[in-house]
Amino acid sequence: MGMRTTSKSILGRTVYHVLVFGFGIVMVYPLLWMILSSFKPTNTIFTTASQLIPSTWTLENYANGWKGFASVKFSRFFLNSLLISVLATLGTVASSSIVAYGFARLKFKGRGLLFSAMLVTMMLPAQVLMIPQYIWYKKLGWVGSYAALIVPYWFAIQGFFVYLMTNFINGIPKDLDEAAKIDGCSTYGIFYWVILPLIVPALITGGIFSFIWRWDDFLSALLYVSKTEMYPVSLALKLFSDPSSSSDYGAMFAMSTLSILPVVLIFITLQKYLVEGIATTGLKG
Amino acid sequence: MAQTGVVKPKRTLAEKLNEEHIAGMICTAPFTIGFLLFMIVPMLISAYYAFCDFDILSPAVWTGLANFKTMFSEAKFWKSLGVTFYFAFVSVPLRLVFALIVALILLRTTKITALYRAVYYLPSIIGGSVAVAILWKRMFGNDGTVNVLLRMLGFEGKIKWFGQPGTAMWTLIILAVWQFGSSMLIFLSALKQIPASLYEAGEIDGANKVQQFFRITLPLLTPTIFFNLVMQMINGFLAFTQCYIITQGKPMNSTLFYTVYMYQQSFEFYKAGYGAALAWVMLVVIAMFTGLLFATKRFWVYEDKR
C-alpha cells in the first residue's frame, strides 16, 4: 500500500513537472526564436525556422543593425530612449510620492474629490486622450519635441503610481509622524525625513514600472517625434520593420533583441519589486 | 494703524504653509495641476472640436453634429467597434482563466515553482514592446515558426494567418493571452491571503478539493477577478501598438481596432475633428460599460461584511 502511494506520487510529480516545464518552453519559445535567430546568417532565418539553435553563429546582424538608417546609428536611438525614460521616470516617482503623501497623511478640503479624480485617471488610458492631447500640445508648441513625452510625467498624471505609493504610506504607522512632529519637524520635513526613507521599496517598484512603460512607449513617440535623429528605439524599430525600408530580418531581430535587453535585465535583477507592485495594486478596487 | 489690543502671535508665512490643510493642497498640487492641464483641458478643447471640421493646420469650422452623423452612418466605425469588443471580450476572460489555472498549479512555493513563475511572467513584462510585435508578425508569417512547427506536427499546407479575418484576429488574441503573467501574480497573492482555517473547516465538513474550490476559493477571489476584469477590459478596448504594427487592421478591416481607426482618421486623413468625436464616443462607451460591470457586481462579487 505504502509502496503504491509513493510510486503514484512520484509519477504524479513527474507528470506535473513535465507539463509545467513543457508549458514554460512554449511560453518563452517566441523569445528564444527571436534571440537565437539574431545570431543566424540573415538569409537562413526563415529557411531554418524549424531549428532553434543556429548551425553557424554570426554577429554580422548586430553589426549591420547597429548602423541604423538614414545615417543615424542605433546607439543614438538607445540614448534617446534612455534620456526620455529616465527623465519621465524621475518625474513620475518624485511627483507621485509627494502627492501620495498628501493623500495618505494630510486632511484638506477637496481631498475626497481629488482622490476620486486620481482613480479615474487609472481607468482612463492614454489612447482615449490621444487626439485631445495632440490638439492641445500642438497649441502649446510641443509637437516635434520631447516635451509631451516628459513634462506631463512630472505632474503625477498616472494614477497607478500615486495609488501604489498611497497604499504603501498608509501601511506606515502614524506614530512616527507624531514623534517627528514633537521633535519640531515640519509637515514637509516629515515627508522628507520620515516617509521618504521608509517608502524606498515603493519608489523602486514605481520607478521600474515607469521605466519599462516609457521604454516600450510607442504611441506618443509616433505622435510627437518627427526627426529621425530624435527617434526612440521603439519608433526606430517600427521603421526598421517596414518592408519598404529594410528586408534585413537578421538585423531587425538583432536590434529587437537589444531593445528588450534593458527590460529583461531589470526583470532578472529586480523581479522582487515588480512582483510586489503587481500584488499590491492589483488586489483591490 | 488700528491694531487689536490683544497681542496675538503673528503667524509667519512658513507657519501658515505648514498648516495641515494648506500643506495638503500644496503636496497634491502637482496632480491637481497635471489633471487640469493634461486631462481636463484637452478633453474640453476636444469636446469643442468634435463639433467641427478640423484638420489641425487650418482653423476649425463649426459643423454641428456632422461628425457624429458621419460616424454613425460609417460602416468602418461600426466594424471597428465590433472588432474592439470582440477582442476585449475574448482575450480578457481567456487571459484571466488561464492566469487563475496557472496560479493554482504554481501555488505551492518551492524553488522550482518560483522559477516557473518568473518564466511565465516574463512575456507580460515585454509583451507591449515593438520588438515583440515585430516578432509576432514574423512568427505568424507564411514561413514563420508557427507554420513550420505545425508542419512538423503533421499539418499540411501553410496557413495564411494574416490573410483570413478569423485567423488574423487570433494572432492578436494569442498575443494578449500570452501575457497572462501579471494576472497570475495577482491571483497568487490573492490566493495566499485566503486563511488556511477555511479549508480546514471545509475538510472537516467533508468537502472535497473541487467543492473547496467552488465554495471557498472562487467566491473569495471574486473581488480580485472583478477589479482585474474592469481594468483589463478597459485596456483591451484601447489596444493600439500591437494592432498597428502587426495587422494594421487587415484583412478587410477584420482587425481594425477602434484606436487604430481613430489614429488613421486623425493623422492619415487629417480629420482631427472627427477623431475628437471618436474619442468622446469611446469615452462614453467605456463609462457605460464600466457602469454596467459595476451594476452586476452585487450578483456575483463576494463582499466581506465583517
Image (spheres, coloured by chain):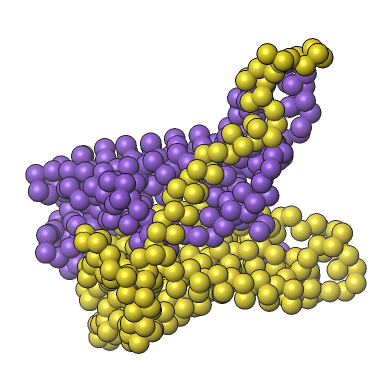
What x and y, as percent, mark residue B110? 63, 51
Examine the rendered structure and indicate whether residue B134 appears above or below residue A99.
Answer: below
The answer to which of B52 and A198 lies nearer the viewer is: B52
A2 relative position to A224: left or right: right
At 11% from the left and 64% from the top, the residue drawn is: A244
The answer to which of A139 and A126 lies nearer the viewer is: A139
At 27% from the left and 78% from the top, the residue drawn is: B250
What x and y, as percent, mark residue A172? 72, 35
Rendered shade, chain A: purple
Whether residue B127 is visible: no
* Residue A31 figure quarter: bottom left
The answer to which of A25 and B3 lies nearer the viewer is: B3
What x and y, as percent, mark residue B247? 28, 72
**Which of the image's four quarters has the N terminus of chain B?**
top right
At 72% from the left and 70% from the top, the residue drawn is: B301
Q: Which chain is yellow?
A: B
